[in-house]
Image (cartoon, helix red, strand yellow):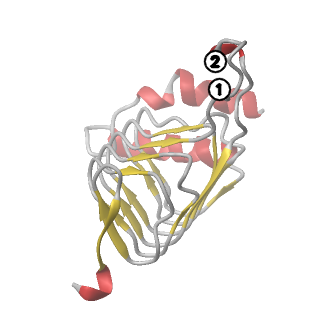
Amino acid sequence: MKKIYLLLYYGFAQYLPKSTRPLGIPSMLFRRFLCNHLFSACGDKLVVENKAYFGNGKDFQVGSEAALGYNFKSMNRTVRIGNNLMMAEDVLFLGGGHQYDRLDIPMGHQASEPKTPLEIDDDVWIGARVIILPGCRHIGTGVIVGAGAVVTKDIPDYAIVGGNPARVIKYRNSL
C-alpha cells in the first residue's frame, strides 16, 4: 500500500497548487493525508507545500503544526522535526556524501557515506533558500535560520543565525 501512496504523492499530489493558491487548501490536505501514511511519525496540522521531496518518507518524523515549504528537499538524511516548525521556500537538507580517500579509483566509483541524522527541536523558523549540510545534526529550540544561510554545524537553543557559513548573530532572549 505504501507504494501506492508514493506513486500518488510523486506522480500527482506534489504538482497540485500551493496552499495559498486557488484550490490550494484541498491540495495541501491531500498531501497531508499521503504524508500521514508515508512518514514514520506525523503530528496534527502538517502543511506540505507542493514539490516537497522527502524520499520514501520512512526516515521522516514530523511533529504537530509543522510546515514543509514549497520545493523543500531532504536528501540522504534521517529527519526528526518537533512541533511548530515554520519553513519558507527552497529549503534543502543535504546529508551523506561520497568518499574520496582513494586516488586509484575515481570519486564517483567510491562508496557513499550513510544517511546523516538531523533533529530539529520545537518552535523553529527556517527562512527561504536555507541549505543545511551534513555537519549540522541538531537545531535547537526556538531557533531562527535567516534566508540564504548555509548551516554547517549544530545551532544552540534560541539562536538567530545567518550567513555562509551560518553563524550566531544573536540570541532571541537578548532582543
Identify the image quadrant of the C terminus. bottom left
| Point 32% across, 38% down: residue | 23
Q: Quadrant of residue 85?
A: bottom left
Q: Is residue 130 left or right of residue 13?
A: left
Judging depth in this view, the residue of 85 and 21 nearest the camera is 85
Name the residue beneath numbered marker 2: 107
Q: Is residue 51 above or below residue 39?
A: above
Q: Position of residue 98 (x, y in %)?
A: 64, 28
Q: Is residue 110 above or below residue 99?
A: above
The reply to whether discs 2 and 1 touch (Cβ–Cβ < 8 Å) is yes
Residue type, mark 2 in image: Met
Looking at this view, name the residue that lies furthest to the front: 103
Q: Position of residue 45 (x, y in %)?
A: 49, 61
Circle 1: is it few (<14), some (14-19), or many (20+) Cα within 10 Å? some
Q: Position of residue 1 (x, y in %)?
A: 78, 32
Q: Disc 2 and disc 1: Cα gap in Å?
A: 5 Å
Looking at this view, name the residue that lies furthest to the right: 1
Name the residue beneath numbered marker 1: 100
| Point 53% across, 55% down: residue | 136
